[in-house]
Amino acid sequence: MGLTARIRTRDGWAVSHAVVTMTDMAGRQVLRAEADAEGAVRDATALTPGAYTVIVTAVGYAPAAASSLVTASGRAEVGTVTLARQGGAELPPPGPWTVDPAHSTVGAVAQHLGISSVRGRFTEFAASVEIAPDDVTKSRVEAVIRAASIDTGNGMRDAHLRSADFLDVEAHPEITYRSTGVSAAGTDRWTVHGDLSLRGIVRPVDLDLACLGTGADPWGGTRAAFRATADLHREDFALTYNQVVQAGIAAIGTTLRVELDIQAVQGESLPQA
């Protein structure tokens, strides 16, 4: 006898802090139970046969209600109740996530000669994500990039980018980003607010973030995928070097588009190879 239920997010993750309330047709509360770490509710309270309403709530999620019929055995099997994030936006399960550099890309695109683009990427970086359990807007992101790892596929150009004209890697070997907040921008889309430190200059930079989904990996772990973009104005970080070619056209555009394709592993560290 009693009530059983499973509380899940839209993509199947357990909601461990959910609360289930059961009321009779007169609106009187007859049961209140909390989900365990696996999102399961098992309560042995004796219930009178009849029709009931089950309400499931959890901080950060929209409430869900369902009808339940208690049988002559005094048992109510609610099944799986799916909760949606407040505002309809989803993030991976709460807790720490570690970015996997081997399956992630930190890139940038600059306009060249006003007619084409040059792409580059940083090959050495580390980053972590902390999804807050109760208020996702308090989630955090931190990243450190080795500036000298810039790679555009051209050795001469890369050497120039490492010089004092651009990244000045000897004086400023690291590029860092630390988030200051997160806000929902739509279903599965978020804006990450944070501070970028580049060439020793700190400026606020917002990332337009899309959550692409989560799933198991072949190594027994759980992974989440993200894509994020941002536009940087070079002069904001004293990246003012340029060369003017014919007709007054600058060789390098004034805006850099940052493109991040990120894969993160659940946990505080990457699995051992």
Image (spheres, rainbow, N blue to C red):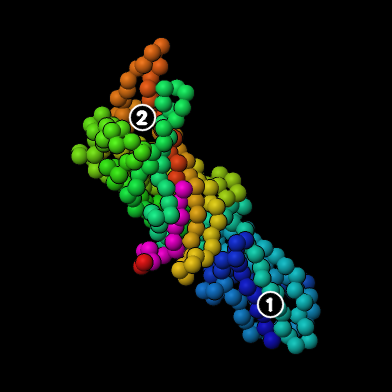
Q: Is residue 270 magenta?
A: yes
The image quadrant that residue 51 belongs to is: bottom right
Q: Is residue 41 above or below residue 179?
A: below
The local secondary structure at tag 1 comes to: strand
Q: Nearer the viewer, residue 198 or 69?
A: 198
Task: Tell me where residue 228 appears, x and y as whole percent.
Answer: 48, 44
Chain-order first, disc 1 or disc 2? 1
What type is the residue that disc 1 sits on?
A: Val
**Point 32% across, 49% down: residue:** 124
Stretch in magenta: 261-271
Q: Nearer the viewer, residue 29 or 16?
A: 16
CB under 8 Å between discs 1 and 2 = no
**Point 38% across, 25% down: residue:** 252
Q: Which residue position is annotated with label 2?
A: 234
Task: Tell me where residue 126 appears, x and y as whole percent.
Answer: 34, 53
The answer to whether 167 appears left or right of 41 in the picture is left
Number of residues whose C-alpha sits closer than 10 Å to that of mark 2, classed few (under 14), some (14–19) or many (20 or more): some
As drawn, the label of residue 30 is 1
Residue 101 seen in render: yes
The answer to whether 36 appears left or right of 79 in the picture is left
Q: Report the quarter where the C terminus lies.
A: bottom left
What type is the residue that disc 2 sits on?
A: Arg
